[in-house]
Each structure stands twice: as C-alpha cells, then as structure tokens.
Amino acid sequence: MAKTGRKGKRKSFFASLAFIVAIIAVILGRFNKSFDSVNNAVTNTSNSPGVHFIDVGQGSSVLLQSGKTGVLIDAGEKEYGETVVRYLKSCGIEKLDYVIATHPHTDHIGGLAQVLKSFEVGSIIMPKLTAANTPTTKTYQNLLETVASKNIRALAAKPGNKYSTGKISFEILGPTVQTNDLNNMSVICKADVNSTSFLLLGDAEKPEIKSIMTRSPDLGCDVILMGHHGSRSSLDSDLFSAASPNLAVISCGQGNSYGHPHEEVIKYLQQNNIEYYRTDKSGNIAVLCPDGGYSVKTQN
C-alpha cells in the first residue's frame, strides 16, 4: 500500500477544498441567476402596469402596480414580510396608495406589518369584523397596532365601493355577510389594470362565492386568482361560467400539508382549457398589462 506524505495530504486537502468551493459557487450562481432573472423581469417593466403574484410559500401576496405606486393585497406569513418589501422595491414601488388585508389569517396578513413600516401607505382596506369573529392573535393585534402607529386610514371593505390609482381601478365584491368562518370574510375584489381584468378571491369558499354571484352582475375577467390556494372548497363551476377567465393563478407552497392545489381543481382547469400558473412551480408570477393585452413572466 502506498503511503501519502504530508505534502500529498496537503495537496489532497486543498483539492477537496477547491472542489467544495466550486460546488458552492455553482449553487450560488444558480440562485443568483434565478433571483436576478426576477429582478431583471421586474426592472425592465417597472414603469409598466401589471399584477405580480409574489411567491410567499403557503400564503398569498399580490401587487397591482402602476408606475411607482400601486395596491398590495396581503403579504404572506410574518417571515415573508421582508421578502415582499424587497420585491416591491425591486419593482420600483415607492408608495402604496392602498393595502388590502383580505382576512386575518396569518398566511395572508403576517407580513403586512413589515410592509406598512417600510412604505408610505395611503389607506388599508379590511373586512369589518364583529366581537364574535375578531381574532385575538398576536399577528392580528400587531397589524392593528402598526396601522394606528403609522396613522394609516382604515377602511371597511364594503361591497360596491370603488377605488382607483393610476391605471388601476378596483371594486369590492365581498365579504357580503358576517360569519365566524374567516375564510368567507375575505375581501374579494375585481380589478382592472390598464386593459386587463382580474378577479381576486382571497380564501373565499363556495358559500361566499355564491353570494357575490347573486350581487355582482359582471364577474367577467381575463385572469382569476384561485380561491383558498386552489382548494376544492373554493371551486365553483358557475363562477367560472360567469367569469370566463383565460388564465388562472394559484398561490401555494411546495409540498404543503393541505395538498393545495387539490387534484380536482387542476383537472377542472385542464378540462376547460384554462391556462394556469402556480407559485410553487413558477415562483414569482408577473402578468404585465400593456395597452391591448397582457403577457406572463415567471421566475422559473
């Protein structure tokens, strides 16, 4: 058996170290390339109107952008607050005229306090809760305290109310009734960004979806954000007949324990020839809205 001297061992050690460094460089290079591709996609279109479905794992966060301002809907769990802040800044956002907190579940409002602390915010729109359905979670209390400390105007989500900023206009469709099911207290809105329409369902499930259908004569849209992260409990064929979307987006986390999106939802989209994107597969998803149409860019 040949023996390895001290110099041989040293060469072997440095060779192994160089190999490890090379592997790390490749991994970091791939990460940076992926991250840069998102930033480049955003930077190249930072002055263009569009809607960004931000990858916040098993949660939801949507930016409606018009130039350097816009509307933010939710911000995922608390640990994604800084992720959303960085994404908004990479888009060139300097102010949020409106923030919508769809409902007080942590996977939607957890990161909002960080966002409110990082940007000038005009108003925040939230569902009007009662003593019976107001949560006492630390996350919700932190959001309310941040709203108060920043002196942000709080508006109750009332169906029929309309708002606009830049090339964005949106109408509140729900919640329509008080319920202890906070998913069905979600703020539902229909938005027009330049010439493209979006139906954004929050975590609303069939009872609330049926309710908005009886109250809202025009649900037609180009793009729909699937309710409740692609849960079967939010899938309603009547809604799709009324909305007739060309594109669906599902916000969900990789390997989540809920099985979102459910198989029935994917089959429905495929059978009805509706193109769809998932944040767990595509990462950040940007629907850019130039005059006369839209295009989709993804991180992956």
Image (cartoon, helix red, strand yellow):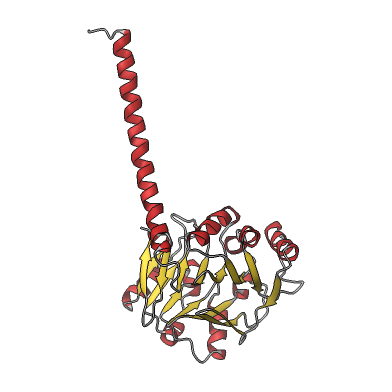
**Residue located at (57% from left, 61% from top):** 107
In this view, which residue lies farthest toward the bottom?
Answer: 217
- Residue 207: tell me if it is visible: no
Percent from the top left, x then y, of residue 19? 31, 29
Observer-nearest residue: 280 or 132? Answer: 280
**Residue located at (77% from left, 72% from top):** 131
The quadrant of the rendering that contains the N terminus is top left
Percent from the top left, x then y, of residue 14? 33, 21
Observer-nearest residue: 205 or 273? Answer: 273
Quadrant in which residue 78 is drawn: bottom right
Quadrant in which residue 29 is drawn: top left
Work out whether 24 lies above or below 294. above
Q: Is residue 101 left or right of residue 251?
A: right
Percent from the top left, x then y, of residue 90? 48, 59
**Residue located at (46% from left, 83% from top):** 239
Quadrant in which residue 129 is drawn: bottom right
- Residue 140: tell me if it is visible: yes
In this view, which residue lies farthest toward the left?
Answer: 1
The quadrant of the rendering that contains the C terminus is bottom left
Observer-nearest residue: 173 or 151? Answer: 151
- The tally of labels here is 0
Work out whether 12 lies above or below 143. above
Q: Is residue 135 left or right of residue 10?
A: right
**Residue located at (62% from left, 69% from top):** 103
